Image: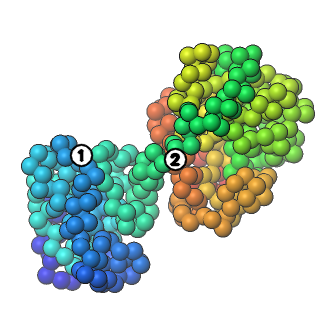
Amino acid sequence: MSEFFEPNVAVIQRRWPALAERLLVEETHLLEVDLTEGLGSTLSINGIQLTSRHDRTREAGLQAGSLPIDCQVLHVYGTGLGDLQLELLRRVGLERLCVHILNGAVFALVLQLLDQQPWLSDPRVELRYAGDLPEIHLPYFALPSELVLADDFNAKIRDRLISETHLTFNNREFDPQAPQIVERLQASLKWVQSDGDVAELFGKRQGQEVFVIATGPSLEPHFEALHVLRNQVERPLFICVDTAYRPLLRHGIRPDIVVSIDQRISTSHLPPEGTSGISLVYMPMVDPQVLGAWQGEKYAAYSASPMYQSLRIQLPRGELHYGGSVIHPAVDLAVKMGAAQITLFGADFAFPGDKTHAGWGDGELGPQLGAARHWVLDGHGQRIKTQLNFRSYLCELERFITGHPHVRFYNSSRAGAMIAGVVFHPELAV
């Protein structure tokens, strides 16, 4: 314990007493700490440098420069060594600086080693654990090192920060002027013109229960129960995503509605044989061969994507929410049909049991287990392998659920990612 710890903690105890109590029990001894030197020096925690080892002040200046100069309230995620906070507090017009702790043990360690009083004492500073709030706030700067080091309690906010940071990059492939998009939409136009409007389905299941079935590995233990329920006279509506269709058929389960949005989905994923009596809800980027071969009713839908702007004007159709995955419009369809209760199957957003999908081999649907470098917490509170885009999809589903408090959401499994706002089904959850 150094000379800095007591005065640092004294400031926090005076200003944020409840937070001080939490910091005092953080297990700093579990961290691997090294001094990393260059032209200057910094701390390395578990092999991750907290800041530049050459010029921390200049680095903080560059980070601060990415935030609007005239904003009265700014947010910093991660505490670092205090450099960015000090840089931002130089701004005369800044009225409030909200600092969100992403790793409590890392911050407690820094309090032991370095004087943090100059920024902690500033009356404009608000300090809290990031995980104490359900959502991120803009404008913000997230310290890259602490996005990697974020602890379990703050992991949900870390995921939202990364998703927001990657948003522009992820949207690059949805340029409405891209030749492949223009070509696909033109090829699908005749089907959009002749097929039904998804809005025709809205309100058709008012107050009823709907099963939304995705393709995560946790779907597999439910095949038998779903088969039994599907054959009952009074049962929930079965809505499945496109990649779940074949695995369901192999177990004798015919969904009522299949939802498909992806240009990479083909007739190998959605074989048309025997599809009479099964409705297909699709967005116009779907392969025209799938649309032409489907035997059941078809309903066109749009998302809010700029890809569909011209089509929306030319051929108005109902809109479904899209947050990067087909699970989003499938859930939104259930809500707009009037569901009072939605139970999710295979909505894992992770690789439980070291598998990527139910009914498909490793890599057949894209992601491979060996490429998983990230984690989320499962329903047991344990870390489980995943990939970055899955975490973004999870964030968007959680935001959607928050926006629909009148619908009860259940999860059928604890094996996949913990989904905020969803409770485990009392009879079906495993």
Which numbered marker is on residue 68? 1
Of all residues, the one furthest to the front in this rendering is 179
Q: Nearer the viewer, residue 371 or 412?
A: 371
Numbered circles on residues, count? 2
Residue ID at (27%, 55%)? 76
> Left or right: 272 with respect to 236?
right
User: In the rendered view, would you say 160 is above or below 107?
Assistant: above
Q: Quadrant of the N terminus?
A: bottom left
Residue ID at (16%, 62%)? 86
Amino acid type, mark 2 = Asn
> Left or right: 152 with respect to 204?
left
User: In the rendered view, would you say 52 is above or below 284?
Assistant: below
CA gap between label 2 and label 1 equals 23 Å
Q: Is residue 289 visible?
A: yes
SS state under label 2:
helix
Amino acid type, mark 1 = Pro
SS state under label 1:
loop
Which numbered marker is on residue 170? 2
> Left or right: 9 with respect to 78?
left
Q: Nearer the viewer, residue 224 or 289?
A: 289
